[in-house]
Image: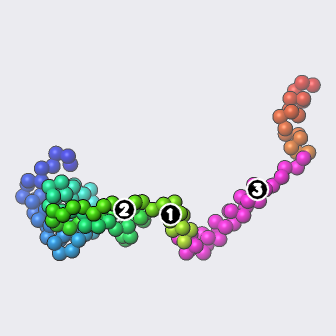
Amino acid sequence: MADMTFKSPEAKAKIDTILALLRAVPLNSHDLAELIPMSRRWTLAYIKHLHTRRRIYILRWDKEIAQREKRHAVPVYAPGRKPDAPKPEPDGKAVRYQRAWNSLKSDPERHMVTLAKRRTRRRLRNLRPDPAAAWMYSSNHQQERVSL
């Protein structure tokens, strides 16, 4: 794709289609790929070409889109030569953990299994070994047996 010149009649037609769609409503690369129809990889190549030629700009960044499981910010493009919107900072650990916990709590069965695993881990962590068994398996005892 690096050697793509975007000068063929087909490429120019796709560029015109992309610009027409963006004039109607600002879109992200996922939506553009569905509307054109073209693979997302090729759509990103066209977007990169148009963005470097300053025919489109980043209007805003969206985190909540249907096509993405993770909440990474995705640029929304619009036609024009305006400056790009600044990319937002990624979510911190607390926000990610809270989102994961809320997702876990929304499924009662997964929530119950997770809590049971935590209880088991806590019990095993607090379990004290039997003194006789600890003596039998200690490293000092093993050395004494070998020396006899």
Snapshot quadrant of residue 76: bottom left
Mark 2, Cα crowd under 10 Å, few <14 / some 14-19 / many 20+, is few
Which amino acid type is shown beneath numbered disc 3?
Leu
Residue type, mark 1 in image: Arg
Q: Is residue 147 above or below residue 71?
A: above
Task: Name the mark on residue 96.
Answer: 1
Q: Could you tell which of marks 2 and 1 lies nearer the N-terminus?
A: 2
> Quadrant of the rendered structure where residue 119 is?
bottom right
Reply above or below: 49 against 77.
above
- Alpha carbons under labels 2 and 1: distance apart: 15 Å
SS class, disc 1: helix
Amino acid of disc 2 = Pro
| Marking on residue 4 | none
Mark closer to the chain start, 1 or 3: 1
**95 on left or right of 1:** right
Q: Which residues are magenta?
A: 103-131
Q: Nearer the viewer, mark 2 or mark 3?
A: 2
Residue 131, how many percent across, how many down?
Answer: 90, 47
